[in-house]
Amino acid sequence: MIGIADCNNFYASCERVFNPALEGKPVVVLSNNDGCIVARSNESKALKIKMGEPIHHYKELVKSKGVHVLSSNYELYGDMSARIMRLLNRFVPVMEVYSIDEAFLDLTGFDDVVSRCHSLQRTLKAWTGIPISIGVGPNKTLAKVANRIAKQTPSMDGVLYLSELAQIQAALADFPCEDVWGIGYQFNQLLKRNNIKTALELTQVHDVWIQKHMTIDGLRLVDELRGNFRRDLDLSPSPKKSIGSAPSFGEAIPDLPTIQEALATHVARCAEKLRRQYSAANLITVFLHTNRFNPKVPQYFQTRTVSLPHASSATSELIQYADSVLQSIYQDGYHFKKVGVLLSGFVPDDFHQMALYTEQPDPRMKQLSNVMDQLNGKYGRDKVRLAIQGFKQNWKPKRQLLTKRYTTRIEDVIRAT
Amino acid sequence: MNTDTRIAIPLFMGHVAAGFPNPADSYIEQVIDLNELVIRDKDLTYFVYVESDSMIEEHIVPGGWLIVDKGLIPENGDMIVAWVNGGFTVKRVQIVSESLLILHPANPNYAPIIVHEGEDYWLFGKVTFFFFEPPKYPIYGDWNR
């Protein structure tokens, strides 16, 4: 038996714990660069404010309805998430932290599940101030279905346990395919074309057709909708297959040196992550683009992937390659909004493909990177850095509507009279 | 990269003394940790900064710090931090009934705050500790300041 605990409107809920004046008010939280909406309170959803839209589309609404617009305060959300996950773990020893605000719970052997979940929900609310919903089913996919229904049905008080087959089928009969966890835009289009609308209809499709059109993963998913157990909890997350970083610039930046600085810093960050999972990258992708939400300025988008002569995890080497890719795609005369890097084609970092006539990695480069990691771990991020990363960093994302980091900075804690 | 142009960077100038073994080494157990004394449960603990003198007779001075535990349910007479009248406040709570609370200051210049059911009130947590730098002058008595 698997449950999923999901924090309701997590970012907005975090903000409300430390500023209850936001209770009952429409709240939206913006992406990295104050650009797009990444979280909404129920009141904002009721105003038909959409996820992912640029905030300036709602200028009028924000004014007339008094919508509270906030920058994302990742320090706060990250700390509250860590607290919530540790607290959940006290009650449920086997769990998988699935995202910043969701965790799969292994509830095998728990009895009286619905009332246990209600008390877990009440305890978490009292202890953290964050409301959660819990969906329970025979597997992950049905737990997700249950959780979604519980959130949409106020009378359930945020808990639903789908146990009997008849109950599962009744739930799936009203459940659109597009809301099933793991069915993306493409699969949904395919199902639409074949007139498969509800999750129940999907369970009745023949296995051969599903595997042919939706691969083995699709078959697993459908099998779980039928009530079988196909996807285990992921207790030791496997190393990532690609690592990327591409925050937007605070302001549109036209000049190459500033973009180089930003890119070098992104690469350094990705290389750190790469070394933390003991991988080395064979491919490096750099992309550069203008602000697509501003149709008045000339638009430019370019991306290029190069294969490295040998797999590397050394910051200095990766920056060198990323920088030459950037120079090859850079065009003068545009106001660039974003530069990004993606490292992929990973191999274990002790793996070296022997090849004739290609340069072998210099082991000292990796040692240098490891020393940099240790120093930065001890003295703070980017204390030791390559000169190309720059020192002014005026391309840093802007977060003008940032609330305080109430739990991670002593000067930001709440004040009482 | 041309290896000839690389130079070694000295990480530490000066020398490190090897030193004698410390005869007390084997007696050291652990360091006194203030967190252990004042924090019951770190996942439930928050810090709050005090801005007013409304609790001065309980020695809660402006500029002092409160340790607040969200995991404890406050009982009648406990010191709490709560949101009321549009801000956070530290007070002693008197639980008159399920629908009536009185938040008591500890300063004759402040009036108690009465909270009826349904009013905007959110409990933040119970105060379990507070600390502050000693004031420059004694609170009571004027020593020719």
Image (cartoon, grey):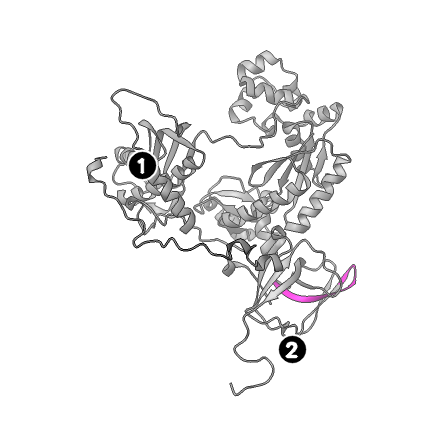
Chain name for mark 1: A
Q: Which residue is mark 1?
A: A365
A193 up-or-down from A53: above or below: above
A328 up-or-down from A388: above or below: above
Q: Which residue is mark 2?
A: B109
Residue type for callout 1 = Met
Q: Nearer the viewer, mark 1 or mark 2?
A: 1
Inter-mark Cα distance, 1 to 2: 67 Å
Counting from the top left corner in percent of width and height, residue A350 is at 39, 28
Q: Please check the rendered image and state whether residue B22 is part of the magenta-colored stretch, yes or no.
A: no
Q: Main secondary structure of the magenta part?
A: strand
A167 up-or-down from A385: above or below: above
Disc number placed over residue A62 in the picture, else none: none
B41 and A59: which one is in front? B41
Whether residue B20 sits left or right of residue A220 in the image: it is left
Secondary structure under badge 1? helix
Secondary structure under badge 2? loop
